[in-house]
Image: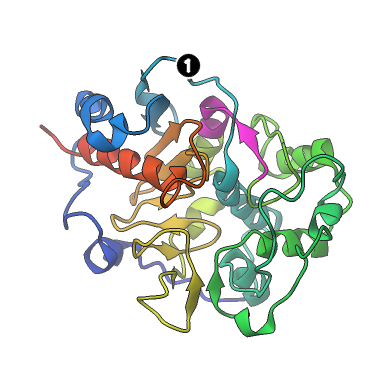
Amino acid sequence: MIVRTLVVGLLASVWSIVPCGAFAKSAVNASAAKNAADTASACRNIQPFYWEIGTKNSVLASGTEGDGSLSRDSVVTIASASKMVFGAYVIQKDQGKIDSETAKFLHMSAGYVSLRAMSCGRGVSTVKDCFEQGDNSKYVAEDDNHFFYNGGHFQKWAVDHGLGSLDRPGLAAEYQRVLGSDIPFQFGVLQLAGGLRMSAAGFATFLQKVVGGQLLLRNFLGADPICTLPQSCPGQALRSPVRAPWHYSYAHWVEGDGAFSSPGAFGFYPWIDSSKNYYGIVSRVGRPRQGEGAGYASAMCGQEIRRAFFTNK
């Protein structure tokens, strides 16, 4: 059993990419959040999108930006937002008893660094089939114990822990068995790290169960964070999809303000604030390989909305 050290309270001052003290939780302001979604340049740049902020019980602020083509019920490919769900699944299935080997897989430090994100479409019928496509199952010994952002870590864990024979409906049913039948999981591709398709409404149900403590992931948010930026920790981190000095916990990012997130390549961006009492979502469909990616662009907008929401103006 590993010892989990919660250091989230230090994150904003140590790793911040936003002004220290931002996002104070003393007050919330839905109208300020709406104004940020409407006017912040980071948000105007990613229209159209839907966004919301809520608690375990309700949605407190929300809006549809741009041409109105996306709503709370629009089902989109959430790509790497699937990672946070996978982490919740593993932790819940193991009843919160995460051993050091599983921790290494959830930290993307297990040496399985060769899975191609678009390699498991038509003709791939099971989780194991996906893992065995091309070089997806390749293990690189010299990359073991180093952070390397790649879905192969999660796929290998799934194959080794009884999920290999599952098809798309079977994997969705297994997620519902462990995380709750009220969450509408749907797999487009059979990749644990990036295969889910969900609406903001469906993902909000998942996040509400996390902030409400119904899912054990809440206890692991921000736990045992590791460095991900090669420039910050040469030799420890090998590959990160963003240049910001975020850290990585159990299948989710820890941002500079202490928020926990899992941005997807097409722009779906879910987050939970550092107090673990509020969640947020930016839902859209963008271009996955534009600059640092549509997910990072959505995160920049989401940060603006989050900052405004926690500012009493």
Q: What residue is at 21 percent from the left and 36 percent from the top? A: 308
Can see residue 56?
no
- In the displayed structure, 116 sits above or below 52; it is below
The answer to which of 221 and 295 lies nearer the viewer is 295
Q: Quadrant of residue 203?
A: top right
Q: Quadrant of residue 46?
A: top left
> Is 191 positioned to the left or the right of 129 in the image?
left
> Is 257 positioned to the left or the right of 123 in the image?
left
Residue 250 falls within the magenta-colored stretch: no
The answer to which of 39 and 3 lies nearer the viewer is 39
- In the displayed structure, 41 sits above or below 134; it is above
Q: What residue is at 82 percent from the left and 57 percent from the top? A: 133
> Is 123 positioned to the left or the right of 61 in the image?
right
Q: Residue furthest left?
A: 313
Q: What residue is at 56 percent from the left and 70 percent from the top? A: 148
Q: Position of residue 154 (x, y in %)?
A: 68, 60
Q: Position of residue 206 (x, y in %)?
A: 56, 37
Residue 202 falls within the magenta-colored stretch: yes
Q: Determine crowd level at label 1: few under 14, some 14-19, many 20+ residues with C-alpha closer than 10 A.
A: few
Can see residue 251?
yes
Secondary structure beneath dot 1 equals loop
Q: Residue furthest top?
A: 68
Q: Position of residue 303 (x, y in %)?
A: 30, 43
Q: What's drawn in magenta, residue-wise?
A: 195-205
Q: Which residue is mark 1?
A: 69
Coloration mode: rainbow
* Amino acid at the residue labelled 1: Ser
Number of numbered discs: 1
Q: Quadrant of residue 169?
A: top right
